[in-house]
Amino acid sequence: MNCANPDCSFCGRTKIEPGKFVAGPDLFIYDKCIEQASLALLDFSGSGNRIFQTNVQDSIRCDFCAKRAKEVWRLLTESGKNICSECVEICNDII
């Protein structure tokens, strides 16, 4: 993990691009990805550029807090990384 110029673990944007990043254990999430995750949690229809998918596999854990899908309201996946609804909420509070 490059803390000087982090890449978003979900979309690949770099710190060079405008925006804010929230750090997790060994990963970062870009503020626009937090926004997209929030929209996915709210199930807004008509959002053709939504990147996150709901993951219900019991063996999958949130990459931020390590909770399993059955321990949280919803677990989202993108680019092989996972974030739970609780961590999305915390990231929104941070941003």
Image: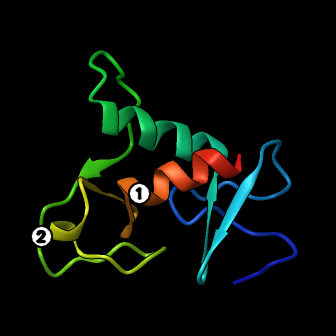
Tell me the SS state at disc 1: helix
Report x, y in % for residue 13.
Answer: 67, 54
81 on left or right of 24: left
Check disc 2 and give the amino acid type: Gln
**Amino acid beneath label 1:** Glu
- Which of the 4 image quarters holds residue 68? bottom left
x and y percentages locating residue 8 in the rendered image: 62, 61
Identity of the residue drawn at 78% across and 43% down: 19
In this rendering, is residue 28 above or below 21? below
Which residue position is annotated with label 2?
Answer: 57
Quadrant position of residue 38: top left
Q: Tag 2's secondary structure?
A: loop
Number of other residues with Cα within 10 Å of mark 2, as a class: few under 14, some 14 to 19, many 20 or more: few
Q: Which residue is located at x 11 percent, y 75 percent?
A: 58
Q: How many marks?
A: 2
Tell me which residue sits at (13%, 62%) in the image.
56
